[in-house]
């Protein structure tokens, strides 16, 4: 059974810092990996999708990498801002449309 | 704009009552999903449907029921058999035939037992 782990569970940084969020998964036979952002009491907003054949994806200040063989993904946030404060969730999809398996998330606080 | 609409945003259930959560999408996605989120826990899959008139149990299906009569709609009923229904419920969709497009989520329904 696929298991997804996110480290750290919580992170507090001063504004302007570059930071890395980690995600690991136990079964490397995945189809996609997707990073989401969740604000308190809200739904999930998709940040980046990495297909299994890709190594990384970038969107603005966000960069996500994928190493399938080691079962790891990282989300890099450059020049963090208070508006980045949220919970970040990593999820893996094993086959197209099968389901998403989620980690428990990293709660990020960026202090002004 | 295409997306997923969940309603209501807040729902209160009395003991022994069945309630139904609505999920509608206009993305032309074939597959739809219901997840439950509890504080301090990750999202857990309740039910999913990859095609109209067909659905499968997820990891925590007991006390829940679904139907998929239309491609656009996937309502979730929380029955009186669900002993601890207070949680945040999220609906999602994707298109397995297209592949590689990721999942889209709704804004959620917060259910509270009173």
Image (cartoon, coloured by chain):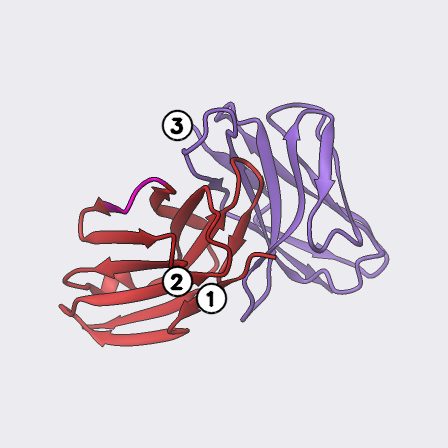
Is A70 one of the magenta-colored residues?
Answer: no
- The quadrant of the rendering that contains the N terminus of chain A is bottom right
Observer-nearest residue: B112 or A87? A87
Q: Secondary structure at mark 3?
A: loop
Callout 2: chain: A
Observer-nearest residue: A29 or B72? A29
Mark 2 lies on residue: A23
Q: Position of residue A14 (x, y in %)?
A: 19, 75
Mark 2 touches mark 1? (CB < 8 Å): yes
Mark 3 lies on residue: B1
Disc 2 to disc 1, C-alpha distance: 6 Å
Callout 1: chain: A
* Dots 3 and 1 on the same chain: no
In the picture, measured across the screen, residue B90 lies left or right of residue A24, that is right
Mark 1 lies on residue: A5
In the picture, measured across the screen, residue A18 lies left or right of residue A57, that is left
Residue B114 is marked as none
For image coordinates 57% across by 26% down, the residue present is: B30
Disc 3 to disc 1, C-alpha distance: 34 Å
In the rendered structure, the colour chosen for chain B is: purple
Sequence order check: which comes first, mark 2 or mark 1?
Answer: 1
| Badge 2 density bin: few <14, some 14–19, many ≥20, Cα 10 Å | many
Q: Secondary structure at mark 1?
A: strand
Residue B45 vs B29, above or below: the answer is: below
Callout 3: chain: B
For image coordinates 44% across by 64% down, the residue present is: A105
Question: Magenta region, mostly helix, strand or loop?
Answer: loop
Q: Position of residue B54 (x, y in %)?
A: 73, 29
Magenta stretch?
A53-57
- The quadrant of the rendering that contains the C terminus of chain A is bottom left
């Amino acid at each position: 059974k696929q298991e997804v782990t996110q480290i750290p569970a919580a992170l507090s940084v001063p504004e302007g810092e570059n930071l890395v969020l980690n995600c690991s998964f136990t079964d490397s036979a995945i189809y996609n990996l997707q990073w989401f952002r969740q604000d308190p009491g809200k739904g999930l907003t998709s940040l980046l999708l990495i297909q299994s054949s890709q190594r990384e994806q970038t969107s603005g200040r966000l960069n996500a990498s994928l190493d399938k063989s080691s079962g790891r993904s990282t989300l890099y946030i450059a020049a963090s801002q208070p508006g980045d404060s949220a919970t970040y969730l990593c999820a893996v999809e094993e086959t197209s449309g099968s389901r998403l398996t989620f980690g428990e998330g990293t709660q990020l606080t960026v202090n002004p | 704009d295409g997306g997923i609409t969940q309603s209501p945003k807040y729902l209160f259930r009395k003991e022994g009552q069945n309630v139904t959560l609505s999920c509608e999408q206009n993305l032309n996605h074939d597959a739809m999903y219901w997840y439950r989120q509890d504080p301090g826990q990750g999202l857990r899959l309740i039910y999913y449907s990859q095609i109209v008139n067909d659905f499968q149990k997820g990891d925590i299906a007991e006390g829940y029921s679904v139907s998929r009569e239309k491609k656009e709609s996937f309502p979730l009923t929380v029955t009186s058999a669900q002993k601890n229904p207070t949680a945040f419920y999220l609906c999602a969709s994707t298109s397995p035939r297209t592949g590689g497009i990721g999942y889209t989520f709704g804004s959620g329904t917060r259910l509270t037992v009173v």
